[in-house]
DNA sequence: GCTAAAAGTTAGACGAAGCTAACAATCTGC
DNA sequence: GCAGATTGTTAGCTTCGTCTAACTTTTAGC
């Protein structure tokens, strides 16, 4: 991807290469952003199924702070993408893939949260920041967070 | 910011308040997401002005990894929002407000980056993750990051 | 078991962010 | 100072995420 036609980077200044790296970084961030909402939904759905026994659109709407039609459209997209299944006027179920994603997200969220608290942050702010940060943490960083959170 | 109108939380059950907190968190994250792109642009524009003497759309496009028309549209929005000024076929300038935002972003980015490196992350991954994380770090967390990065 | 409330859906609008294609202006090299 | 390359703009399309308004279905209370 990111088809770079590099005619004449022979005499290229470091500028050009730096630009590429930067562009790739931003493209990665954009890709992450596209998945954020799906991850938030899937994570929330898993949680609702766990705590309430089922995931109803109305509860998703309340917890996400959006209106019902927004939820409906997003759920359609999630279904299209193979993360959930749903029937009209019924509650939502995760597919195998959805469940796997939810588990991964929960794990990631957990680590980021514990890390922040361990750093000294109050739990409420930690929860808030974790929500935003968790989608942008690489495997490597996550490992460091986990190590820090677990150290004695 | 994040104007919260809390009418009638008097007789509210814990459910609702939990839901509200969650909803507020997500709304905060969504608000942050809306600003991310603007912040990325403004930060990049400041950097280009500093290193190249001017910020040309073509360079912005290259470093952001998007096409020229996308940059044009985004710059229009930034101009509308008072962050930059621009004239047709000319390069871009930051307004006072834009400069302030750029400075703040740079500061934030700097701290997150140093923090990650201090944690033990390789500089390249650190740069990448900082790009994604910096927009989701509260003042409180930033302070802790700074303290950690600076400790002896 | 009917009726009213709650939940869900459909339709349609809007703005943001991305793209390609086509055109216009500016800059550069002779 | 003109031609061709580079840069910038405009038009128009797509997808996503949000909304309101209006409708249908399901659920719950009597």
Image (cartoon, coloured by chain):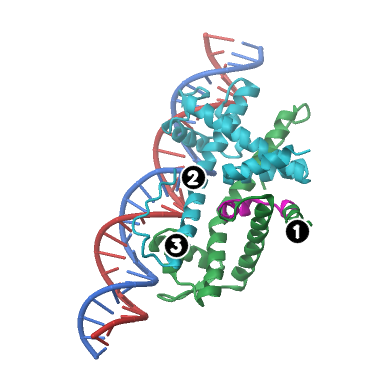
Chain colours: A green, B cyan, C blue, D red
Q: CA distance from mark 2 to mark 1?
A: 34 Å
**Subunit of label 2:** B
From what the image shows, is residue B32 above or below residue A43?
Answer: above
Q: Look at discs 2 and 1 and give the one toward the viewer.
A: 1
Q: Which residues are magenta?
A: A125-142
Toward the viewer: B77 or B113?
B113
What is the quadrant of the C terminus of chain B in the image?
Answer: top right
- At 78% from the left and 44% from the top, the residue drawn is B122
What is the quadrant of the N terminus of chain B in the image?
Answer: top left
**Subunit of label 3:** B
Q: Is residue A3 among what the camera can see?
A: no
* Magenta-drawn stretch contains A133: yes
Query: In the shown orientation, is residue B121 left or right of residue B64?
Result: right
> Secondary structure under badge 3?
helix
Q: Which residue is mark 2?
A: B34
Q: CA distance from mark 1 to mark 3?
A: 31 Å
Q: Which residue is mark 3?
A: B17
Of the residues under marks 2 and 3, which one precedes in the sequence? 3
Q: Is residue A59 among what the camera can see?
A: yes
- Residue A150's label in the rendered image is 1
Residue A8 in the image: x percent, y percent? 74, 30
Query: In the shown orientation, is residue C2 left or right of residue B38?
Result: left
Query: In the shown orientation, is residue B123 left or right of residue A2?
Result: right
- At 52% from the left and 50% from the top, the residue drawn is B29
- Residue B47's label in the rendered image is none
């Amino acid at each position: 991807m990111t088809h770079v036609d590099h005619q004449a980077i022979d005499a290229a200044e470091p500028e050009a290469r730096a630009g590429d790296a930067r562009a790739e970084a931003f493209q990665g961030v954009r890709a992450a952003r596209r998945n954020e909402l799906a991850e938030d939904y899937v994570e929330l759905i898993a949680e609702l199924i766990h705590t309430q026994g089922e995931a109803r659109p109305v509860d998703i709407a309340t917890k996400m702070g959006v209106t019902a039609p927004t939820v409906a459209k997003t759920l359609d997209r999630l279904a299209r993408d193979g993360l959930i299944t749903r029937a009209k006027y019924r509650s939502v179920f995760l597919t195998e893939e959805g469940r796997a994603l939810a588990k991964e997200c929960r794990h990631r969220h957990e680590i980021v949260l514990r890390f922040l608290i361990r750093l000294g942050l109050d739990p409420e702010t930690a929860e808030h920041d974790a929500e935003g940060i968790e989608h942008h943490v690489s495997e490597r960083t996550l490992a460091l967070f986990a190590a820090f959170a677990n150290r004695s």
